[in-house]
Amino acid sequence: MSRRILGVFYLGLLELIRSAVFIFFGSSICAQNILKRNLNDNSVVCIGWGVAYFISSIIAINKQGSSVFSITALYHFWNKKISKGEFFLSIIGQVVGAFVGACLAWALVYEAVFQLDKGNHMLTGPLRTAQIFAGYPSLHQSTINAFFAEIVSSFLFVFIISVVENSVRNVILSKFIHGVTLIIILLSLDFNSTTTINPAREIGSRAASYIFGYNEKVFSFRSSKWLLIVTMGPVLGSLLAMCAFNLLRLCSTSKKVNNVRSKGTQASPHVYGVHFDNLHSRML
């Protein structure tokens, strides 16, 4: 029992470390792009997040059920790869890790941020820097569109993870495909709301930005609707993806069973080269 409890806490600690590494690299890359005022080209940021995901995901890669995103932890829990206790500790570890990673990134870039905005940290506008630590919608994006974007992006990510986990046996190759998938999704949808499809980052890193001086609007942006969008949208999208994949797998399995049965029915009169219909007629 004690070994099992230690295993649960070990997974939580592992998720904390992975999340901290992921958020540190990702936030630092965002900071380089934003502080250089390269706001119209986020392709480097998207690629950076994907590479950061791959690097952080191969830490203690042999540990079953370990992940980087909250929605991948939900995927492992859904498929009974981790227990309920491991799932909750994974989420807590990811949120705390996101907070730690954001603090480490802030320690490196805060001087440049103060030089840019003179201490008036902004969420929107030409001098905005809050996007270093969390995702916020573009001016043109409505609440409904943002929620739909989060559902679609998380659906695609978890669905592809499900396919890869069930077809690719090489773990490192599997994690690499996950990273490439994240890059493609971010490149497709990043223009709207810097879609990160990671509720752990949106809670832990956002809380860190509040401490850094980005006031309470980091939580109450758009009448607090935005925080619900970036946390509940990925959860809903991942649940839909897992249901869709299980449905496809069920249909595929039933089709294979029917094919086997049909072949078995055709071959049943012949066993070991004996035709039972002729044998029966001879016996009569």
Image: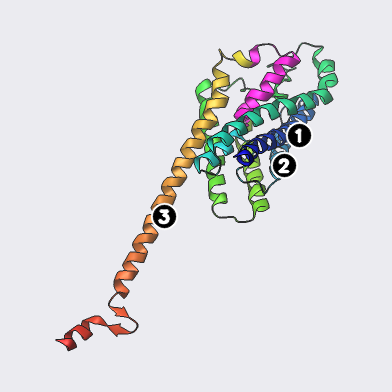
Q: Main secondary structure of the magenta part?
A: helix
Query: Disc 2 marks which residue?
Result: 51
Q: Which amino acid does label 1 sit on?
A: Phe
Q: Give the range drawn in magenta.
A: 191-218
Residue 212 image point, x, y percent: 75, 16
- Establish if 165 lies above or below 77: below
Q: What residue type is labelled 3?
A: Ser
- Establish if 130 lies above or below 26: above
Q: Is residue 209 magenta?
A: yes
Q: Which of marks 3 and 1 is nearer the N terminus?
A: 1
Q: Earlier in the sequence, mark 3 or mark 2?
A: 2
Q: Distance between the residues labelled 3 and 2?
A: 33 Å
Which quadrant of the rendered structure holds the N terminus? top right
Residue 232 image point, x, y percent: 52, 26
Q: Residues within 10 Å of mark 3 (few under 14, many from 20)?
A: few
Q: How crowded is mark 1: few (under 14 residues within 10 Å), some or many (20 or more)?
A: many
**Image check: 98 left or right of 260?**
right
Q: Distance between the residues labelled 3 and 1?
A: 40 Å
